[in-house]
Image (cartoon, rainbow, N blue to C red):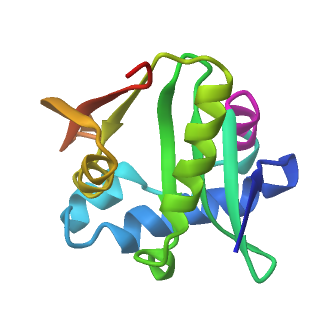
Amino acid sequence: MQVRPFQPDDAAACAQVYFRAVRDGAVRYYSDAQRRAWAPETPDSTALGEKLLNAETFVAVRDGEVVGFMSMTRAGHIDLAFVLPDEMGRGTADALYAALLNRAVSLGIAELTVDASHLARSFFLRHGWIAGPAETIIRNEVSLSRTFMSLNLRK
């Protein structure tokens, strides 16, 4: 597997990764109604591509295919972090996170933040993040829970 910076041609593959990660990868954590509200359809690849291009984004590529991606705003907020269901437990998210963490340090970012899903919460806790308050958001008239988390990079 290779981790590299996002390229505009990755947008459609990233949209598929997002959709499959939510719809299939989050089955143990969210109900069918919640997953459908979170990802009612595959995201528009043009809009997603612009968002990822305007962030610090890395993609994981295995056998020539994008299998995951992670993005961070320039203020240090991890906005999107998704891997294909088949990639869960294979170190893909860890490799993406390592690349993003190195980038954050090189940019001099003092603190990283994330609004983590149930699934992502355990990942970030494993990497030393501190869990803050949980909140419920409404997406497409369905309640979803997430947890605000942070990591101090100036320790």
Q: Quadrant of residue 49?
A: top right
Up/down of 25 relative to 82, above or below: below
Residue 39: say if magenta: no
> At which x and y percent is residue 54?
73, 27
Residue 52: say if magenta: yes
Q: Main secondary structure of the magenta part?
A: helix
Q: Quadrant of the C terminus?
A: top left
Q: Quadrant of the N terminus?
A: bottom right
Horizontal side of 114 relative to 55 (left or right) equals left
Q: Please tell me which residue lies in front, 101 or 117.
A: 101
Residue at the image point whose x is 49% and y is 69% from the top: 20
Point out the stretch of residues depicted in magenta: 47-55
Up/down of 134 relative to 60, above or below: above
> At which x and y percent is residue 70?
57, 48
Residue at the image point whose x is 45% and y is 76% from the top: 85
> At which x and y percent is residue 32?
24, 67
